[in-house]
Amino acid sequence: MSLAGRGVVKMPDNEDLYSPEQVRDQVQTWLMGEGWSLSEKAHEGASWLVQAEDPAQRRLLVGQTKSPADQVRIQATVVVAADHREHFEALPSEVKDAILWELRFRLLNMSVDFSGIGEPLERVTVAQRIYLDGLTKDRFLQRVAVVKNALIAVIWSIGRRLSHLPAPSSHGDVLIH
C-alpha cells in the first residue's frame, strides 16, 4: 500500500522501498503546495538537490544525502555583507564575543545545526535533517519552518547589533551552497 498519496513517505526496514526520485518528487510537491518556487541543482554528495525560494525570496537548499542515504537535509546560508563584516571586525573584542555567543545560543535554542559563527564572520549556515523513516508532510514542513526562522534570526540578529548601518531585509544577503 502506497502512503505517498497521503503525505507520507515511510521507509520502515527497507530503504529501497522508495527511490530517491520518489522522495524528491514528494518533497517538491509539498514545497510547491506551500508556495515555494523550486529549481534543481547538482551536488556530488546528494542524490538530488533543489533550491527552494519562498514568496519573500528566502532561499533554502533541500536534498537527499548519498551517505547516509536515509536522510533529507534542509539548509540555508547567510553571507554577511562586506560593510557589516567590516563594522563587526571594528568592534571591541568583548562586544564581538557577546554577539557571537548570543547568536550561538539563539540557534541552539532553535534546535538547528549551525556553522560559521566565529571570526571572521563571513557566512552562517543553519540546517536540520529528517530521516526517511519519519518523513511526513507535517514533520518535513515543520523543519522547513524552523530552518527558515533560523535564517531570519541570523539576519535580524546581525542587523540589530550593527544597527547604525541599514539593517538587511529578511531575504537579503542570502547565498546558498
Image: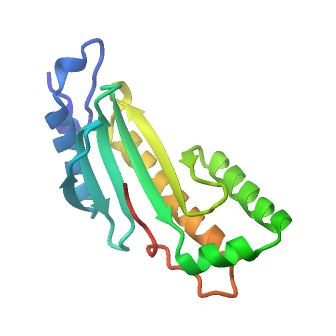
- In terms of image quadrants, where is residue 138? top left
Picture residue at 51% right of the left edge, 61% below the top: 151
Q: Position of residue 26 (x, y in %)?
A: 20, 42
Picture residue at 44% right of the left edge, 47% below the top: 142
Nearest the eye: 173 or 11 = 173
The outermost residue toward the right is: 94
Asked whether residue 159 is in view, the answer is no
Q: Name above or below for residue 122 compared with residue 159.
A: above
Please give the count of numbered marks on the rendered protein.
0
Looking at the rendering, in which quadrant would you find the C terminus?
bottom left
Nearest the eye: 138 or 36 = 36
In the displayed structure image, the side of residue 91 where residue 70 appears, left or right:
left
Q: Position of residue 44 (x, y in %)?
A: 25, 39
Picture residue at 27% right of the left edge, 25% below the top: 10
Q: Position of residue 31 (x, y in %)?
A: 27, 54
- In terms of image quadrants, where is residue 94? bottom right
Q: Name above or below for residue 135 compared with residue 89.
A: above
Indicate how the structure is coloured in the image.
Answer: rainbow
Q: Name above or below for residue 136 compared with residue 159.
A: above
In the displayed structure image, the side of residue 102 where residue 148 appears, left or right:
left
Q: Name above or below for residue 165 compared with residue 151.
A: below
Picture residue at 66% right of the left edge, 55% below the top: 118
In the displayed structure image, the side of residue 163 where residue 146 appears, left or right:
left
Looking at the rendering, in which quadrant would you find the N terminus?
top left
